[in-house]
Each structure stands twice: as C-alpha cells, then as structure tokens.
Image (cartoon, rainbow, N blue to C red):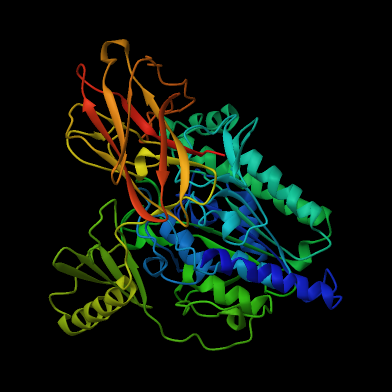
Amino acid sequence: MGRIKNLVPGLFLAFCLALGCDSRQDDQPNVVFILSDDQGWGDLSAHGNPLLQTPNLDRLIQEGLEFERFFVSPLCAPTRASLLTGRYHLRTGVTSVSNGYEVMDADETTLAELFKANGYRTGCFGKWHNGSHFPHRPEDQGFDEFIGFCAGHLTNYFNTGLDSLSHTVKTQGYITDILTDRAIDFIGRNKDQPFFCYLPYNAPHSPFQLPDAWFDKYKAMGLDDELASLYGMVDHMDYSIGRVLKSLEETGLEKNTIVIFMSDNGPNGVRFNGGMKGIKGQVDEGGVRVPALIRWPEKIEAGRKINQPLAHIDWYPTLTGLCGLDPVMTKPIDGMDFSTQILGHHAEFPSRTLFTHVAFLNKNLISYPGAVRTATHRLVVRDTAHYLYDLVKDPGQTTNLAPEQTELAGNLKNQYDQWFASVRQGYKPEKAIALNTSHILLPAYEAEYTGNLRFAEGHGWAHDWLVNWSSTADTIRWLVESDTMRVFEVLLKYTCPPTDLGSVISVRLGEQSIQATVTDSFDPPFLPSPDRVKRKEAYEKEWANMRLGAIRIPGGKHHIKLIPVSVKHKRVSEVAGIELIEEE
C-alpha cells in the first residue's frame, strides 16, 4: 500500500510537466515549518520568562500571528504524526515514543505528500521520530530530501552521524547549526519553485549538550547546569531561526513564504511555564499548551493573537487552505481549516472540543491518562477518577470542580470515552518490520524479550540495549515481514568481556536454526560525552559485529529469535541488535 501510495505525487508532477506548468506561480507560497523539541510555553522571553532571550521568536510574534492557546500531544512522536496528517495520533498507529510505538502507518498521507502532489519541492531537516524502517521513513512519506535522525533522540550533538536517504552522513559541528545550514541550502536551491521546508530541531531535548558560549551565558546568571543548558539550547536555536529568516530576506522570498513555529510538547522539566500545571508527558495544561505562531508578510496581519483553542491536527487542513492546494486522497481529517480566520476575514470560530491522550511503553493501550479541552474547561482523566477545571477562573488547575459540577464533568467524560473508542479502532499492539531493503538494522529497543533480560538504561528508549542475558530461557525476538523469500546474513551487534566468552547463541525462524559461539571479546568503555549534566538516556558506546550465519526468510510475517543454547559463564553478552544483510 505504501509503495503504491508514493507513486501518486510523482505521477502528478509528470502530468503537470506534460502540460507545461510553470515552476513558480505567484499564488503558491513557500512554507517553512519550524518545530522545537521539548520547549515549553514559558521558554520564550515574549511570554514573560525573566532569564531566557529569544529575540527572533519574539520578532516573529510581532510580525505575525500568535496562537495564544495552541495544543499538542504530551510526547514527541504523537505530536509529529498529528501535525503531519491532520489526524489524532492514535488513528495513525502512533501511541508512544519508542519500541515501535512511534511508527506512523505507511498509508497515512502527510503534509509532504500533499505539497509534493501540488508541485512543491519537499525537504525535512532534523528529528523525524515516526519510523526508521521502510516504508515509514521521511523519504517514504513524501520528502524529496532528508537529513537528520529517525529515532527519538541522538546520543551526541557534536560531530555526529545523521541519516540521509538510506545512508549515514558523518557531520562536523553542532547539530543545530548543521540542520540550519541544510535548511538554508535547501531554500537557496529551490528559490525558483515552491517548497515545503520542515525544520524539526532537537533542541532543547536531552542529552544537554551545547557550545560553551551559549552555556556560559546562562551560567553567568547563576543558573544550575541543567537550566543553563536548556536555556542556552533554546537561545542558540533562536539564533539559528534568525539565520533562516535572514536567508529568506536575502533570496527575496520573505513576502511569499509562510513561516510557522511551534513546539511538540510541554517543557522537559519543571521551570518557568506561566503558572500552568503539568510538564512533558502529562495531560494537564502545561504539558500540552505550547508556543505557536505563523507569519506571512502582507497576508496575515502583524501582531494579531487568536485566543480560541487550536491544535496540531489543524495544520494539515489549514495549510491546504492558505496555500490553495488541491486535496489528495486521504483518510478522514480530525483538524479544522482555520485559514479564513488566520487571514482576518472575520469568520466565526466554531465551538469545538479537543482531546488528549498519553501512553508510555506499554503494549496494552488503555484510555488514561487523557483529557478534554473546551474553550473554558479542561477535564483530566486519571485511572478511574476524573478532574474538572475552569481554566478561565483557575488557569493553574488548583480546584477540582468535578464533585460539584457533575453534569458538565459527566458530559465531557462521555465525550472522551466515545472519542477514545473511535481513535482506538484498528490499534495493532505488534508491528512487523518490513524487510524490503538489502541492509536492515533490528535494534534491541524494538525487540520483545523474556526472562532475565532488561534494558541497560531501563526505559527502552532509542539507542538503549539489552543486558543480563544469563539463561537459556532468555529470548530476544523481532517480528518481521517480507514480501517474498529472501536470504539474509545475520550479524549480532554485541559486547562481551573475556570472562564471559564461550556461550552458544541460536538464531531461529520457524524450523530453521543456526548456531554460533561467542569467541571474541569486545568490552569498550562508554564514549566520551559532552553532556553538561548526567543524561536520562543511555550513553553511547561502540559495538562489535559477530557473524551468526545465513537464514532464509519466506514471504509473510515471522519472528526472528535469539536464544542461548548454552551459557558458559555468568552472561552471554550485551545486545544492541542484529543486522540483516541480504545475500546476493
């Protein structure tokens, strides 16, 4: 389905060229969509932050329109799926942030596919976080160009390796600078044709790494290392956004380019956030209300503010309206087209209710935590209890009104239950990894496991690995799917000290079984890290490759399993995953 779907934009372009369409039309504005990562509503100087300096974002607020109450999901990948598709993330197959729960269904239609079908050049520069395997990568979902990373975070922000159209590019410098350079280059190369430039920065997501000058600036204010890092990363991103704006001016594209900025969830920690309750991962106001703005010189009145609730699901239909795009076949959209209101045509804002859900790394998808947001109230659903807040009179959510306003609370709870039942339809607790490329990495954090095994860091976020492989009952397995019979060589990515050598590992698929003995030790230390504070994520280290043998994978879905045949000493090895390399 995904492969057929991706033919549509190309056929549209071929048809357009055959008719002699102009490469640039005056009524086709460019779009630069900038997304920050874990930046809270309070992480702007324009919002009253007494320490942080964000002059370029403040300038965009002054020159454009700010959405005073803009809502997203509590976590990264769900918000990205919703803004790209105009649909609540649970409908798209995305439920959380790792273990495959961040993967967006391939048959979803993205903004990139919409713009591409309308003759736009499309580029993504930064954090994708909606799938790292075919057919879920940026290049499979409508982007002509991509450089960045597909997982939830990077382990190193300096001189790092980045994904780019099925291969890895070794970069030099700081990640925010690199992504900005690539976006500016994309803008310059496409100034004579309409383009959609998606710039999802990873700042200020941890690990907290940034150049000295930006860190020292906030340390000089007496801040602790974590807050100095966070504010320095936002400040540096703001400086980089200024570079993007300057490139639009220098190329003469400023007036014909829509610039959008927003964050993907609330702040990644407790800090200034306008007195709101909640942070990242929580369904309270502070966890889901984020900075959001749009600028289009001479088309959108400067300095305006919209107080009515809008959300990430609204970008797909609203950009369709603003850019005059011809619709493409898509699934039903949850968002609303607010292009008329944004352009100041005095249209009424319809009454609406927005819904929020958060799930962590749990296969069993349950209905809570969740929330309902109207223009005046928020209902928060936790376990079997729910809490009602009047956000006009009580913006800090200090008083639960549910016991006294039972009718309103019950009505909103019923709406939430109906919504959740609707968006949960089609939920698939297991997703197969497609074997449609010749070289595939099956990482440990996408595996299921049994027995004594556990993740090294603990959560199973991106780049984590499995440890304590100590028994013949400890199994690691991946669900894969192939469209035809193929033969792959299997490589184990592992570390093992000399004292644990000698265990025998079996790779099994159905009745097939191949075995290999761990004979070579490899036990490196963690790589040096420029973290300013101890990180929450797994640290970075190198891995050895051990050839396990070749295995035949028939068409269809199958589990590839790693099982110890014997454990020679205390443990078998630590496991970062397996690589599959197709035999010619």
Residue located 16% across and 34% down the image: 473
Q: Is residue 469 visible?
A: no
Q: Position of residue 64 (x, y in %)?
A: 65, 67
Q: Is residue 338 visible?
A: yes
The quadrant holding residue 384 is bottom left
Q: Is residue 324 above or below residue 540?
A: below
In this rendered view, identify the residue nearer to me: 324 or 583: 583
Q: Is residue 424 above or below residue 496?
A: below
Is 505 placed left or right of 220 in the picture?
left
In this rendered view, identify the residue nearer to me: 133 or 301: 133
In this rendered view, identify the residue nearer to me: 435 or 123: 435
Residue located 41% across and 70% down the image: 88
Q: Position of residue 107 (x, y in %)?
A: 49, 68
Is 417 placed left or right of 46 in the picture?
left
Q: Position of residue 32 (x, y in %)?
A: 66, 60
Q: Is residue 574 above or below residue 32?
A: above
In this rendered view, identify the residue nearer to me: 50 or 536: 536
Q: Total number of numbered labels?
A: 0
Residue located 16% across and 63% down the image: 383
Is 564 placed left or right of 286 in the picture?
left
Q: Position of residue 105 (x, y in %)?
A: 45, 63
* Quarter of the image where the C terminus is located: top right
Residue placed furthest toward the top: 498
Q: Is residue 16 above or below residue 280?
A: below
